Amino acid sequence: SFQNGEELVYEAEFSRAVLRNVDIADFRFTAVQQPSNSQPGQAATGLVLTGDIATRGFFSKLFNIRIHEHIESKVDPVAFSVLRTTKLDEQGKRVRISEAVFDRSLGKITWTERDPNQPQQQPRVATASFAGTIQDVVSAIYFVRMQTLEVGKPFELQVSDSGRVYRLPVNVVERRRMKTVLGRINTIRINPELFGDERLIRGKGKFSIWLSDDQRRIPVRAHLSNNLGTFEIKLKRVATIPQPQ
């Protein structure tokens, strides 16, 4: 459903009370297949997915903070299960670097987080168990794109973040035509249940994603609402990253 070197670029808008559709952030996702050292029982190539989110302009002024997050996810392209996740999380002067390693043979996740500004501090470490295929917050997007989506037929994701494992129901809600940067196309809407107790995000909120209703299943729009306001994330550009020969 996605090609080697695919790059998806999004812009996010924020609305609350008298504020309407204020540009606040850029999102960028890439999928690249890379050669790896082949070992018995392992795939000859590795799939690397990246997500990069950076706030800008109004958001930084409104909340007096700049946020940048870069996530790299290495995935087994055969089982499509995440093998390793590295994350850089910058919130103003606060910086955290974390790594999660997924051992499918043992069914174990080892997550480590450190503060590069405080090298003398001991890193935070957490472990968790899992069975079957598992995703992180970036690979989950691509996993969803590979599913057969039928309205009224929900499915479940097993997602790990910060050393914890969550089971997230995903409801397939409707089909509709929508105006997008790709033109006026058929889309299909899903509602992942991100909010609530034992979910990725505590508290109340709603989240929807519209994907192109074709073989590529490109996410063209997302809508998130919570107590802060509403966030509209729209596809701005689809590109292909040149790959070395």
Image: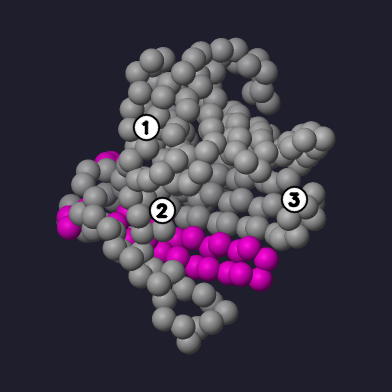
Q: Position of residue 10 (x, y in %)?
A: 65, 39
The disc at residue 59 is 3
Q: Secondary structure at mark 3?
A: helix
Give the vertical position of 32 relative to 178 (above or below): below
- Residue drawn at x 60%, y 38% is 226
Left or right: 167 with respect to 53? Answer: left
Check residue 180 for magenta coloring.
no
User: The N terminus lies in which quarter of the figure?
Assistant: top left
Q: Main secondary structure of the magenta part?
A: strand
Q: State the residue in front, 241 or 21.
A: 21
User: On the image, which quarter does residue 158 sit in?
Assistant: top left
Q: Position of residue 44 (x, y in %)?
A: 29, 51
Q: Residues within 10 Å of mark 1 (few under 14, many from 20)?
A: some
Check residue 100 for magenta coloring.
yes
- Residue drawn at x 27%, y 58% is 128
Give the vertical position of 32 relative to 230 (above or below): below
Q: Is residue 114 visible?
A: yes
Q: Which residues are magenta?
A: 77-106
The disc at residue 169 is 1
Q: State the residue in front, 29 or 243.
A: 29
Q: Residue furthest bottom?
A: 120
Amino acid at pointer 2: Asp
